[in-house]
Amino acid sequence: MNMSEPTKRPCADGQGTLPSCAPLAVPYVPFQQSGSQTYSQQDALANGTLFPGLNLPFQINTVAATPAQTGVLELQALSFVLTELGLYLDTHPDDKEAFDLFREYTRLAREGRRRYEAMYGPLTLAATADQDQYTWINDPWPWEFRQEGGRR
Amino acid sequence: MFVYEKKLQYPVRIKNTNPKLAALIISQYGGPDGELGASLRYLSQRYSMPWPELKGLLTDVGTEGSF
């Protein structure tokens, strides 16, 4: 669980806010509040959401699957958090705390990407320009599953 | 515009191959009423969206669903 204390949350974390005056007999989706609690990036990737308040498993007592540790996992977790924060910020652009978190995770993801590319090769065609040779076409591609220690 | 990243979004470990299940999953993605069709609809709907928050949201959700 994260990090800095939330700034202003009038309701409990799993609850949202509604307009103060609303027409009768109309169903609503409560707005997510600013300053909602967030998971760590690994827990976010495993649970499929950055926000504990939005984690609504199909069955009670569902335990989030912990993905196997691989070289790319840290980057996948950081990318997932950035996607989540981006979607949240689209509709909460004035949440300063979330924007700070977005900037911090962007910085971490840039570092993670640099480390990954140094070990495994370029992630984008453009990043291939930083290599000594044109390695973009080198195997493995993401869909080419390999047994650990084995061939393919 | 999109830039391809040479990695998976989420780790995949296949213990047993299962062509029937694979066909089901790929049709959930690219088949009728699949995610790919939905994502292209999001990317078209944003052209008539008046609110900036939702122009951004349709762009980002449509982008996410394309991969």
Image (cartoon, coloured by chain):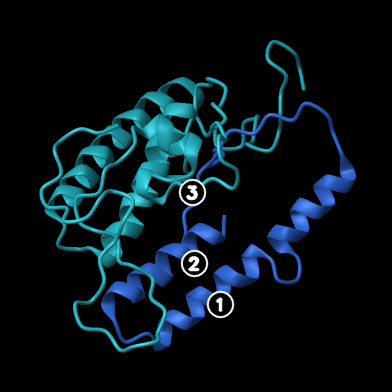
The chain to which mark 2 is attached is B
Chain letter, colour cyan in render = A
In the rendered structure, which amino acid carries the disc numbered 1? Arg
Callouts 3 and 2 in the same chain: no
Q: Outermost residue, front direction?
A: A24
Label 3: few (<14), some (14–19) or many (≥20) C-alpha neighbours in 10 Å: few
Q: Is A13 drawn above or below residue A94 in the view shown?
A: above
User: CB atoms at circles 3 and 2 under 8 Å apart?
Assistant: no
The image shows residue B18, relative to residue B14, as above or below, that is below
Q: Given the image, what chain letter belongs to the residue carrying mark 3?
A: A
Looking at the rendering, in which quadrant would you find the N terminus of chain A? Answer: top left
Q: Nearer the viewer, mark 3 or mark 1?
A: 3
Please, what is the three-letter code of the amino acid marked with disc 3?
Leu
Indicate the quadrant where residue A30 lies: bottom left
Label 1 sits on a secondary structure element that is helix
Whether labels 3 and 1 share one chain = no
Q: CA distance from mark 1 to mark 2?
A: 8 Å
- B29 vs A148, nearest the viewer: B29
Q: Secondary structure at mark 2?
A: helix
**Circle 1/circle 2 CB separation < 8 Å:** yes
* Residue B34: % across, % down: 69, 66
Q: Kindly state the secondary structure of the residue where label 3 is placed.
A: loop
Inspect the image, locate mark 2, and give the three-letter code of the amino acid beneath it.
Answer: Gly
Identify residue for label 3. Answer: A56
- A97 with respect to A30 (left or right): left
Which labelled disc corresponds to residue B41?
1
For residue B62, which numbered disc appears in the image? 2
Which class describes the residues within 10 Å of circle 1: few (<14), some (14-19), or many (20+)? few
Say whether marks 3 and 1 touch (CB < 8 Å).
Answer: no
Q: Which mark is residue A103?
A: none
Evaluate whether residue A132 shows in this view: no
Which chain, by letter, is blue? B
